[in-house]
Amino acid sequence: MERKPLLISAFLIALIIIGVSFYSGEKSEANGISTMSEASMIGTASETTTEDGYTGTTLVLKNLAGEDDAFKDYEGKVVLVNIWAWWCPPCIKEIPDLIKLRSDYKDQEFEIIGVAISDRGQGDRVDKMVEQFSINYPVVRGDAKIDQIMRDFGQITSIPRSFVLNGKGEVVEDITGMRDYAFFEGAIKKHLKPKS
């Protein structure tokens, strides 16, 4: 038996335990948000810098239709990456606020990408939740590339976990735990271009 599937399974079980304990009220950070330094941006310049100055992740994940969705395609936009799972109550609770946030700011070079992890062979549940909530932002499947997600974004020790990326794909905000509309709005507004 290969070692890699065992490690991924162990990681997913750990996520379940951590997610449940987090939902019970344990929080790893007092304010839940930390601004990343320039040195901790996604990827490295030698791996990912392009001629136009993009320094973000080269991550490409499958959307729910099975098509490739590349993070680089969102270059120039502020992107909120929300890592979640269908079995995680706090993840589900923040979805309506994310839907509203996307509706309110979609015309300001802003996007949300929902990264669904731990399908546990039940990927259809993600599809049903997207339909049930009428999720208006792209949702991609993260399980197949969990190693790259952790390499590019760091260890994911609890969910929900969100990251704000600037127009160059650099992580500028790291948000641990469930948050509401006002919190997410505050996290993105300082990185959006002013309205003309």
Image: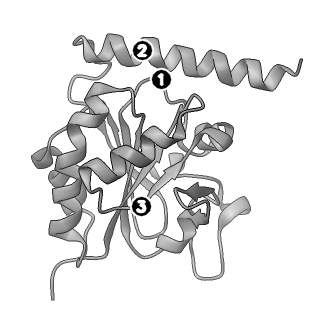
**Sequence-first tag of 1 and 3:** 3
The residues tagged by marks 3 and 2 sit, at their Cα atoms, a distance apart of 26 Å
Q: Which quadrant: the C terminus?
A: bottom left
The residues tagged by marks 1 and 3 sit, at their Cα atoms, a distance apart of 23 Å
Query: Which label was assigned to residue 157?
Result: 1
Residue 18 screen position, x and y as percent = 42, 15
Residue 50 screen position, x and y as percent = 65, 75
Binning the other alpha carbons within 10 Å of mark 2 as few (below 14), some (14 to 19) or many (20 upward) gives some
Q: Tag 2, which secondary structure?
A: helix
Can you say whether 151 is above or below 11 in the image? Answer: below
The residue under label 3 is which amino acid type?
Pro
The residue under label 2 is which amino acid type?
Ile
Front position among marks 3 and 2: 3
Q: Nearer the viewer, residue 1 or 58?
A: 1
CB contact under 8 Å: marks 2 and 1: yes
Q: Tag 1, which secondary structure?
A: loop
Judge left or right: residue 133 versus residue 146.
left
Q: Which quadrant: the N terminus?
A: top right
Query: Which label was assigned to residue 63?
Result: none
- For the point 23% across and 79% down, the residue is 107
Residue that numbered label 3 is attached to: 138
**Sequence-first tag of 2 and 1:** 2
CB contact under 8 Å: marks 3 and 2: no
